[in-house]
Each structure stands twice: as structure tokens, then as C-alpha cells.
Image: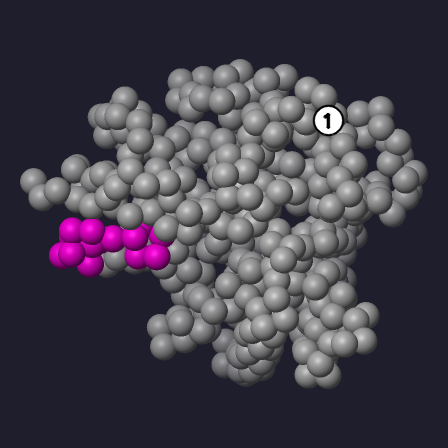
Amino acid sequence: MSLDPDRLRCPYPVYEQLRQEAPVYWSERLQSYVVSRYADIAAILTKPKLFSSIRQSGPSSVTALAQRLIEDTDTPELLKKQAARRLDISGKPTLINADPPIHVRQRKLVSQGFSPRRVASMEPEVRQIASDLFDKFETRGSMDFVADFALPLPMTVIANVLGVPPSRMADFKRWSDAFTRGVGALDLSIAQIQQIFGAVDEFYDYFTAQIEERRTQPRDDLLTDIVAARLDGEQPLLLNEMLHMLSVFLVGGNETTTNLLTAITLRLLTDNELVTRIRNDTSLIPKLVEEVVRLESPVQGLFRTATEDTDVGGTPIPEGSMIWIVFASGNRDPEAITTPEDIELDGPNGLNHLAFGKGEHVCMGASVARLEARIGIEMMLERFPNLRLASDEVPPVHNSFILHGLQRLDVVNTPR
């Protein structure tokens, strides 16, 4: 896939061409089949035994990077040791890269941490965090919406949920960056790789100590729930399973929600008719969230691996082949979506979108992301009636074909 900024900002014409001309396309660069039609993607997602999640980030993940470092004879010994630790931990399939029955067991063990009751109880805390962040904006009158709100809101929420103190927030951000920096990048230098694995090691060391502390000093947080998780007849989670699970929560709990909040805000500030309608009827915000997550899928797609010879859409797929299932393309497929390119607030347009996955691997934290997005947008519109973009410059995008979002979004508010 291309990492050209214009292509990353708007990959949708390419997806449309793929759907029309080559819905199951072999990519030499990815060494993977690219699947772009909604029906084919949905079918793959509901067949976990045939299409394994074991390499869900494909060739551009921290784990794949670790494998390449170990195989490279020129890799410095310390970096090779760090890469081996990553492989040891991620080599134990956990949630996002686990298949049944392992995935079923793990999901059952931690599902209480994302129960409707637990998520609903988070609303006052989310509102307080959002309010504190907006207080700073109100004082200054301008901000980078990404760095000053869309990033710290979900990051602070997931940090609090995991019991990370405010004094470690800067570290928490570095660790999150380390796990996401390699996803979809494809072009990292040795210096960047060393920085990534140094931060990954810090993350593992910190949470290994925290896990041991929770065994003897439990708290009311998700980490304690994970450590204490027990089901009749099921083995408790092992240390490496917990560490891998926490890295999944770290990335899923903030990076994707940051991109969603930013995408919604950009849409509102560039569409006067839309923002006026939402201001006049804030009950439409949940539907707006679903439509923007469909149109601007923060995770453009994930990978699956064929466990046997099969076919997708009539195209033969040999056993062992990787398949990139492009959620963002399926979410704009006219065969599945009534008005695929438009925000539709009145009908069932995006009710069955793929942005949070489908089947076994539907995102556990989707309800938290929806809560944060709803509250964030609701409070932003209430507090800043004259919010606008600071300039007409095109915002820079992330250097990733998987994680889709803006690096920054400068906004200003004119006082009432």
C-alpha cells in the first residue's frame, strides 16, 4: 500500500476501484490478498477457524518487526534480546490475535471489565476529564484538538481504568506510541526501532510489577479484574497473556478513539449544515458517531491468515496466505450501504458497519469509544458555539495505511 500523504488522507477512490475491478487483489508489497467488498469481509470475519487472527497486524506490526530483527544477523544483541521478549509475549495468542477456543476463554475472563454496568459507571469520570481539558482551551481560545483533547481524553480514561497514576501519563503516552508506531508504517529506521523496543520493554517492566502488586493489594480497576479473573473449569490468565492483553487495551483504548473524535470534529467544522443540525438536536450525536466511524474507520483494516486452501469471492486463496480485510472499503460498499459516501442521520445507513469488527472479534471496547465520542462531541458543541478551524491548511495525517487519522487539527473559538 502507498504511504503517500494524499493517498493516506483519502484512500477511498482506490478502495472503490478495487471493489469494482479486483475485489480480491494480490499485493506484492504486502505479500497479502486485499479484500475490499463488504460481503466478502463479513464472511471472513464470521469464519475464525478458516481465517485465523494470529497475524492481525500483518507484516507491519511490532511483532512482525521483532521477527525480522531476530532473523537479521546484523541486529545488535540488545535489540535482538528486546525483540525476543516481544515475540515471547505476543507469541501467546491474546484476544485480538487469538482464535477459538483460546479467544473465547480470554474474552469470558475479562468481559466483566467491559460490562454495560462498568461502562455506564465511567460517564461521570469521562465528563470530568473532558471538562478539565476544555477549561484549558477556554482560557487560551485556541488549541491543537488532537494533542489537547482527542488524545488525552481516551488516554486518561484508559490510564485511570488500569490504575496508572497521573505522574506516569507521559510514560503511558510514549508506550502507546511505541506499540502503534510500527503498525502500517513499513519504513522505520534502526534508530526508530530501538526507540520503539526500549519503550515496549519499559511498558512490560512497569505492568509486570503492577500485576504482582494487584495480587496482594487489589484495587477497583480493570487491572485487578484481569489479575483476579476466574471461571469454573478455566485456567487463570498467565503473566504473558496479561501483558499482551494490556498492550491491546493501551492501543485500542486511546489511539482509535483519538482518531474518531478528530474525524467527527473535522466533519462538523467543515459542514455548516451538519453542525447546525447536530447543535439543534444533540440526540443525533450517537448516530453521527456511527456514521463517522463508518466513513473514516480509525482502523482501516486488519489481517487474517488462511488455515487451509479456500477461496474468497471466487478467488483461490492458498493455505498460509495473508489476507488484508479492508473495513474502510466495506463500509463504503454501495452493495451494503444505502448512501455509502454520505452521513445519513435518518435511516439505517451504517448500523451494520465493520469499523468495530464483526463476529468473534467485535471490539470489546466499542462501548467505551462510543461513550467517549458522544460525551466529547456533546460537550464541545455546548461549550464552544463559535468553534472553527484555525486555518485552511490541510491537516497532516499519520504515516500508516492501517491506523487512519490526523496528526493535528488546529482550532479556535471566538468568544460569545
Q: Quadrant of the N terminus?
A: top right
Question: In the rendered image of this protein, does residue 407 appear above or below residue 197?
Answer: above
Q: Is residue 319 left or right of residue 385?
A: right
How far across and down, in percent of the image, does residue 385 sit?
17, 37
Q: Which residues are magenta?
A: 134-148
Where's residue 362, x and y in %? 62, 42
What amino acid is found at the position of numbered circle 1 in the picture?
Pro
* Residue at (39% x, 71% y) in the render: 169
Residue with the mark numbered 1:
23
Q: Is residue 308 above or below residue 25?
A: below
Residue 287 place in picture, x, y as percent: 41, 29
At x 74% / y 25%, what residue is drawn? 22
Q: Tell me if 62 is positioned left or right of 266 in this view.
A: right
Our reading of the magenta stretch's main secondary structure is helix
Q: Quadrant of the C terminus?
A: top left
Which residue is pictured at 29% across the width and 38% down the height?
A: 392
Q: Is residue 366 above or below residue 220?
A: above
Q: Quadrant of residue 195?
A: bottom right
Q: Indicate left or right for 173 with 34 as reference.
A: left
Q: Which of the two residues, 85 or 230, is positioned nearer the viewer here? A: 85
Q: What colouring does the structure picture have?
A: one colour
Magenta highlight on residue 169 = no
Residue 62 appears in the rendering: yes
User: Which residue is at the far left?
Assistant: 416
